[in-house]
Image (cartoon, rainbow, N blue to C red):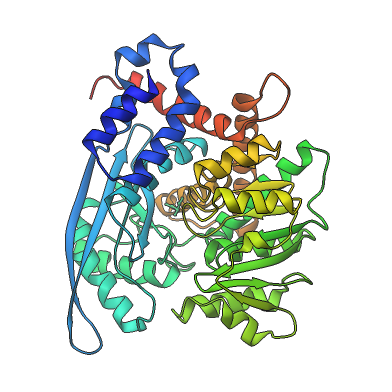
Amino acid sequence: MNVQTIMTNLEAKHPGEKEYLQAVREVLESIEEVYNQHPEFEKAKIVERLVEPDRIFKFRVVWVDDQGQVQVNLGYRVQYNAALGAYKGGLRFHPKVNESMLKFLGFEQIFKNSLTNLPLGGGKGGSDFDPVGKSDEEIMRFCQAFMYELWRNIGPDQDSPAGDVGVGGREIGYLYGAYKKIAREHSTGALTGKSYGWGGSLMRPEATGFGAIYYVVRMLKEKGEDIKGKTIALSGFGNVAWGAATKAVELGAKVVAISGPDGVCEIPGGINMEMINYMLDMRASNRNKVEDMATKFPTLCKFTAGKKSWSVKCDIACPSAFQNELSEADAKELIANGVQYVAEISNMGCQAEAIHAIQAAGIPFGPGKAVNAGGVATSGLEIAQNAAHYNWTAEEVDQKLHKIMNDIYDMCVQYGKQADGSINYVKGANIAGFMRVANAMMAQGII
Ligand code: 2IT
């Protein structure tokens, strides 16, 4: 494989699909060396097959808002690769959603799901629907309209969506209710992230953030350090930041920043449980303003409009909101302020130049597809429980999640250890994730 030749062809075929091309380039660059040691991969055109999704569904979603106005959105589901199992991946509702964004997320999902060692293929979907400012009824009507179209293409043995940015427990409830009504399929794993009591798994809401902190703990341990007493800057205040903050505080770390599209909330004394719980109210309000935290806790937080979490001095920086949210300039500011570790909890949270700057400074960098894999892993555990018509206890799920994250960490070290003893977690995650998919594709023939 020649990465540049493949990228030139892809750029010509998919012009302007920035995020998709960025995600593909990052993976190809890190697997190139290993790939070229396997002439059978080249002969079977594994990479050329892997970079194009199996199929993409794109559909119109029509719904009526509270004013009686007809609204028209676009819906998508990208079924990317099923070598390891039925398609699996979240749904993102955000005004910037387009095909490129969902292709990047679906492509990343293939390798992330592979890292979990569960039988999960890769997929992603969503809509350009903007949940900000929408009423609960509008959210419900939109979810129902979205499912009118999507239901035919999903199912526990076919494709199982979950949440992502803009899609949480409430949305999954409405989507699942609509799915059951239309498909007449009940108690199945056609969607994950359901609430406990009607098919959901305990610990699924916490899983992405908890898993990420389990991974970060291992990154620190590698250097003989403990998370206790470390300061952490998170971004966003959604499900991912909420779970990470909960586990970080439990382990004695201090979360000193969260953020929103409006700015950053600095929390010099560290976030407390009351504030962490308030993050849930902030999300449910659909206002999408982190300033609400400072309004509610004025003596503990300081809000600064237009600033990001990366302007706050911290030991560990964890992007946990959106792709490309941490730029090269942000990385340099973090480095100047003494950051010791960076771990992406969002998907592709760092721009490529930011990752290069962090790695060049000798700072360990954990990539999203490994760090945040606990979310989809626990979705896999939810499907397993659904198939068995059984529920595991929170301790059982957490134990399995913890083991999966430890195994992912070990695989990243195995494939990412450099000659000088340092660990390139990006390379480790990409190679480990890729090899399992490539071997499955080889075994299943040219299809
Ligand atoms: O990016 C992700 O891994 C998710 N949004 C979760 C996917 C899932 O199917 O649980």
Q: Residue at x 48, y 52 (%)?
A: 324
Q: Residue 257 at x, y = what percent?
A: 67, 66
Q: Would you identify the image quadrant in which residue 20 lies?
A: top left
Q: Residue 60 at x, y = what percent?
A: 16, 63
Q: Residue at x 36, y 74 (%)?
A: 131
Residue 140 relative to residue 58: left or right: right
Q: Is residue 123 visible?
A: yes
Q: Residue 312 at x, y = what percent?
A: 69, 63
- In terms of depth relative to the viewer, which is nearer, 397 or 313? 313
In which quadrant will I find the N terminus? top left
Q: Would you identify the image quadrant in which residue 255 lies?
A: bottom right
Q: Is residue 120 visible?
A: no
Vertical relation: 138 (above or below) 403: below
In which quadrant will I find the C terminus? top left
Vertical relation: 17 (above or below) 92: above
Q: Residue 348 at x, y = what percent?
A: 48, 47
- In terms of depth relative to the viewer, which is nearer, 324 or 62? 324
Q: Residue at x 65, y 35 (%)?
A: 360
Vertical relation: 438 (above or below) 397: above
